Amino acid sequence: MKILLADDDRSLRRVLQFKLKKNGHDVTAVEDGNRALDQLREDRWDLLLSDIKMPNVDGIELLEYAKQLQPDLKVILITAYATISQAVRAVKLGAFDYITKPFEDDELFAAIDKATAFRKLERENKLLRGRLEQNERTGKLIGVSRAFKEMMRTVDKIAATEAIVLLTGPSGTGKELVARTIHAKSERAGREFIAVNCGAIPSNLIESELFGHVKGAFTGAIKDKKGKFELANGGTILLDEIGELAVDLQVRLLRVLQERVVEPVGSEQWRQIDVRVIGATNADLQKRVAQGKFREDLFYRLNVIPIEVPTLAERKEDIPALVKEFVRRYAPNTKVTASPELIDRLSLYSWPGNIRELENLVERIVILRKADVLSVRDLPNDFGVTPAGVTESASEHLTYHEAEEKIIREALNKCGWNRTKAAKYLNIPRHVLLYRMKKYRIEEMQQR
């Protein structure tokens, strides 16, 4: 356990520090409340062990400040002048335990062990609550495809770390949901997750939005305002479309990442923050670096753990599960399902808008459905089924089944009847291609 010890009695401080370290704890000892506050502003702690009677800032005041800076911090107070009223006040202010001098080592270690167990239970509860809230608020990541599983293996490995993550991929692939999942699987689950779309905020406002401002910093700044970084303190911030940040703001962001401090607009004071940063972009940042539009040092600072979020065209095996999830979301407590024919047709499409496009389509057909079994007839007239690389002329003036058979034949001919290549060309799984070849007896007819 990481313990901050505050006591003005030098000999007692040294003895306690020695015994706590011997018991396996990481201990930093300071001589008064002011020094303890400095430590609390600079770093995160598991436990504050403080004497009550100290010069400048006493233990009760320190307790109040500590709970403001780190609300989940466990605080054990020590005093030689115990009174019932003092003990009651300490507990009301959030003290975990209260020990009276003189005390035995066993009494102190029992209180610390109890705080450790309680903190562990709190973290487990926060982790579980964070995952439940994540699922309720934005849904969960779903998939069985190889591309999806590879991405999730990386997510599971890095979630528990503090490493900066850079998510890349086209719009609509679900980068924010991946970021929320990383947060929900981390020790920061249950704390703030704040998403900022850097491309959607006007350039004259984004500095204040990210870093905050003080009263009078500019016209209209009638009071102090915390920026997104401070609001996310203790949690995670997602900087979406980070490639759209102006170069001067990139300099400020680099300092935030390197030194973990922010300077509100109009202020000359730096404020310490503890935030995990996840960047996301659909742009080629390396290309923007070469063009002088993105700082190279910031790129390398962000690109510690790069994760490419696959397109829907790269994970078409996931369409059945995704459709099922979206139907559940938009038609809860009903018997609405999607027909196999509908799933087949959706699998033929190239999905340039990715998962967002699929979700929007499912929402539309669920609302306008003619029956509880969603079918091809529920698709809008303007829905296209032509896969990437296949011309529209292939499906003009044909029924759906005729168009599907013609598209498959064209792909097989183009790929020399190599089924694996044809499946890749159509952006569908090989087993789906084999099923449709059997369905239309394409292989038999080819052999004649």
Image: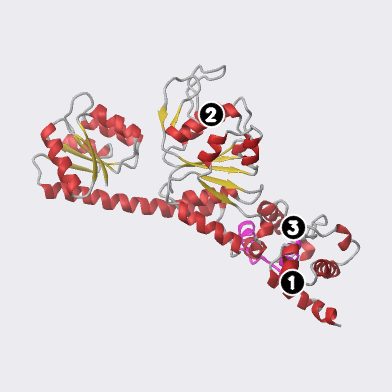
Q: CA–CA distance between discs 3 and 2?
A: 39 Å
Q: CA–CA distance between discs 3 and 1?
A: 18 Å
Q: Position of residue 350 (x, y in %)?
A: 74, 57
Would you say residue 304 sits in the magenta stretch? no
Considering only vertical position in the picture, is 39 above or below 155? above
Q: Secondary structure at mark 1?
A: helix
Considering only vertical position in the picture, is 45 above or below 399? above
Asked whether residue 79 is in view, the answer is no
Considering only vertical position in the picture, is 189 above or below 82? below
Crowding near the residue tagged with mark 2, few <14, some 14–19, many ≥20 C-alpha atoms within 10 Å: few
Asked whether residue 158 is in view, the answer is yes
Crowding near the residue tagged with mark 3, few <14, some 14–19, many ≥20 C-alpha atoms within 10 Å: many
The first of marks 3 and 1 along the sequence is: 3
Residue extent of the magenta highlight: 324-350
**Residue 15 located left or right of residue 362:** left
Foreground label between 3 and 1:
1
Query: Could you say which quadrant of the image residue 34 lies in?
Result: top left
Q: Residue furthest front?
A: 290
For the point 18% across and 25% down, the residue is 55
For the point 26% across and 38% down, the residue is 92
**Residue 69 located left or right of residue 216:** left
Residue type, label 1: Arg
The first of marks 3 and 2 along the sequence is: 2
Q: Secondary structure at mark 3?
A: loop
Q: Position of residue 397 (x, y in %)?
A: 91, 63
For the point 51% across and 39% down, the residue is 301
Residue at numbered disc 1: 419
Residue at numbered disc 3: 350
Q: In the image shown, does 430 or 74 lie closer to the viewer?
A: 430
Residue type, label 2: Val
Residue type, label 3: Ser
Labelled disc at residue 251? 2
